[in-house]
């Protein structure tokens, strides 16, 4: 059964902004954040006391803990290794037009030949 929850105006402004940026409904954005928060609270990889301190605005962030950095790097590497459908379409269009489609080992723009398949 659906429930009504009152949120402060500044929180709703954040929800609206992030929902718009991520293509979610307001409910979808709030649900997304709730799931993230729940996962963090239950995770053994995150320091809940440290997260609470940050959320209260009482933490001066300097550098992530090693396990946090490793988790972030693992997730980032995994995501970067698997392009999304939208990225595949974007680079497919660029390739069909003979435009730059990536960088070589030296950091130089690589161009695709017109009409080549991706």
Image (cartoon, rainbow, N blue to C red):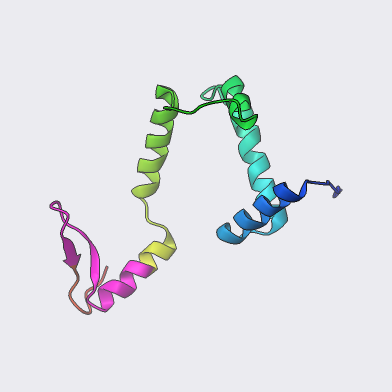
Q: Position of residue 44 (x, y in %)?
A: 55, 22
Q: Is residue 29 above or below residue 96?
A: above
- Residue at 23% x, 68% y: name it: 100
Give the percent coordinates (x, y) of residue 8.
78, 46
Q: Which residues are magenta?
A: 90-110
Asked which quadrant contains residue 62, the reply is top left
Q: Is residue 89 magenta?
A: no
| The stretch drawn in magenta includes residue 104 | yes
Q: Looking at the image, can residue 42 be seen? A: no
Residue 23 point in image, percent of width and height: 59, 61
Instruction: Name which residue lies at 71% across and 48% down.
Output: 10
Question: Looking at the figure, which quarter contains the C terminus?
Answer: bottom left
Residue at x 61%, y 39% (from the top left corner)? 36
Count of numbered labels shown in the rendering: 0
In the figure, residue 116 lies in which quadrant?
bottom left
53 on left or right of 65: right
| Relative height, residue 105 to residue 34 (above, below) | below
Write down the quadrant of residue 50 in the picture. top right
Q: Is residue 47 left or right of residue 79?
A: right
In this orientation, does residue 61 appear?
Answer: yes
Is 84 on the left or on the right of 40, as rendered? left
Q: Is residue 56 above or below residue 4?
A: above
């Amino acid at each position: 059964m659906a429930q009504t929850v009152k949120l402060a105006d500044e929180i709703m402004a954040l929800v609206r902004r992030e929902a718009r940026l991520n293509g979610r409904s307001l409910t979808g954005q709030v649900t997304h954040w709730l799931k993230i928060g729940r996962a963090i609270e239950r995770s053994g990889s995150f320091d809940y006391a440290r997260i609470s301190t940050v959320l209260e605005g009482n933490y001066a962030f300097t550098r992530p803990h090693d396990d946090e950095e490793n988790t972030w790097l693992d997730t980032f590497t995994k995501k970067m290794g698997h392009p999304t459908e939208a990225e595949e379409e974007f680079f497919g269009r660029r390739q069909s037009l003979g435009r730059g489609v990536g960088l070589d080992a030296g950091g130089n723009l690589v161009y695709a030949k017109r009409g080549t398949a991706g």
